[in-house]
Amino acid sequence: MVKNEDFKIVRGRDKLKLYQFHSKIAKHFFCAICGIYTHHNPRSNPLMTGFNVGCVDEIDSFKFDDVPVNDGNNHPLDKK
Protein backbone atom coordinates (compact mmCIF):
# COMPACT_ATOMS: atom_id res chain seq x y z
CA MET A 1 0.00 0.00 0.00
CA VAL A 2 1.16 3.50 -0.82
CA LYS A 3 -0.33 6.95 -0.43
CA ASN A 4 -2.45 7.90 -3.44
CA GLU A 5 -0.07 10.72 -4.32
CA ASP A 6 2.80 8.20 -4.49
CA PHE A 7 0.96 5.90 -6.93
CA LYS A 8 1.36 6.62 -10.63
CA ILE A 9 -0.05 4.80 -13.65
CA VAL A 10 2.48 5.22 -16.44
CA ARG A 11 0.49 3.64 -19.26
CA GLY A 12 -2.77 1.83 -19.92
CA ARG A 13 -5.06 4.08 -17.87
CA ASP A 14 -7.52 4.07 -20.78
CA LYS A 15 -7.80 0.27 -20.47
CA LEU A 16 -8.88 0.30 -16.81
CA LYS A 17 -12.41 -0.33 -15.58
CA LEU A 18 -13.71 0.59 -12.13
CA TYR A 19 -15.73 -1.78 -9.96
CA GLN A 20 -17.54 -0.57 -6.85
CA PHE A 21 -20.18 -2.10 -4.60
CA HIS A 22 -22.16 -1.43 -1.41
CA SER A 23 -21.00 1.95 -0.04
CA LYS A 24 -19.18 2.90 -3.28
CA ILE A 25 -16.25 4.16 -1.19
CA ALA A 26 -13.75 1.46 -2.15
CA LYS A 27 -12.56 1.52 -5.76
CA HIS A 28 -11.32 -1.65 -7.47
CA PHE A 29 -9.62 -1.35 -10.85
CA PHE A 30 -9.23 -4.08 -13.47
CA CYS A 31 -7.88 -4.29 -17.01
CA ALA A 32 -10.83 -4.20 -19.43
CA ILE A 33 -8.91 -6.44 -21.85
CA CYS A 34 -7.54 -9.29 -19.72
CA GLY A 35 -9.43 -8.81 -16.44
CA ILE A 36 -6.39 -8.66 -14.15
CA TYR A 37 -6.75 -6.73 -10.88
CA THR A 38 -4.40 -3.75 -11.07
CA HIS A 39 -5.04 -1.65 -7.97
CA HIS A 40 -7.60 -0.47 -5.44
CA ASN A 41 -8.43 2.19 -2.90
CA PRO A 42 -9.84 0.42 0.18
CA ARG A 43 -12.96 1.54 2.01
CA SER A 44 -11.01 1.49 5.30
CA ASN A 45 -8.52 4.05 3.95
CA PRO A 46 -9.39 5.52 0.53
CA LEU A 47 -6.32 7.78 0.72
CA MET A 48 -4.13 4.71 0.12
CA THR A 49 -3.65 2.54 -2.96
CA GLY A 50 -2.98 -1.18 -2.91
CA PHE A 51 -1.61 -2.57 -6.15
CA ASN A 52 -0.73 -5.79 -7.94
CA VAL A 53 3.07 -5.98 -8.11
CA GLY A 54 2.64 -8.30 -11.10
CA CYS A 55 1.58 -5.20 -13.05
CA VAL A 56 4.89 -3.43 -12.41
CA ASP A 57 7.26 -4.02 -15.33
CA GLU A 58 10.42 -3.87 -13.22
CA ILE A 59 9.22 -6.57 -10.79
CA ASP A 60 9.21 -10.29 -11.54
CA SER A 61 6.73 -11.60 -8.97
CA PHE A 62 7.64 -15.20 -9.90
CA LYS A 63 11.05 -14.61 -8.27
CA PHE A 64 9.65 -13.85 -4.81
CA ASP A 65 11.00 -16.49 -2.42
CA ASP A 66 8.44 -16.11 0.37
CA VAL A 67 5.29 -15.35 -1.60
CA PRO A 68 3.27 -18.06 -3.33
CA VAL A 69 2.36 -17.06 -6.88
CA ASN A 70 -0.24 -18.55 -9.20
CA ASP A 71 0.41 -18.05 -12.89
CA GLY A 72 -3.27 -17.69 -13.82
CA ASN A 73 -3.32 -20.82 -15.97
CA ASN A 74 -2.39 -23.50 -13.48
CA HIS A 75 -4.45 -22.94 -10.34
CA PRO A 76 -3.53 -25.37 -7.53
CA LEU A 77 -7.17 -26.40 -7.04
CA ASP A 78 -7.35 -27.51 -10.69
CA LYS A 79 -4.80 -30.28 -10.06
CA LYS A 80 -6.35 -33.71 -9.76
Image (cartoon, rainbow, N blue to C red):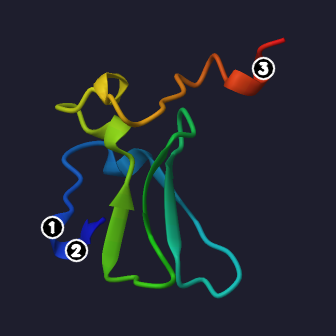
Residue drawn where x is 54% and y is 43% of the image: 32
Residue indicated by mark 2:
3
Residue drawn where x is 54% and y is 27% of the image: 70
- Is residue 33 positioned above or below 39 on the image? above
Quadrant of residue 77 within the rendered picture: top right
Q: In this image, 28 relative to 47: left or right?
A: right
The amino acid marked with disc number 3 is Asp
Distance, label 3 to label 2, CA atoms, is: 37 Å
Q: Helix, strand or loop at disc 2? A: strand
Q: In this image, 66 relative to 79: left or right?
A: left
Q: In this image, 9 relative to 55: left or right?
A: left
Which one is earlier in the sequence, the residue at label 3 or at label 1?
1
Which one is earlier in the sequence, the residue at label 3 or at label 2?
2
Q: Helix, strand or loop at disc 1? A: helix
* Marks 3 & 1, CB-CB < 8 Å contact: no
Residue indicated by mark 1:
6
The amino acid marked with disc number 1 is Asp
Return the x and y of residue 6 as percentages of the image width and height. 15, 67
Quadrant of residue 54 within the rendered picture: top left
Residue drawn where x is 31% and y is 30% of the image: 64
The amino acid marked with disc number 2 is Lys
Q: Helix, strand or loop at disc 3? A: helix
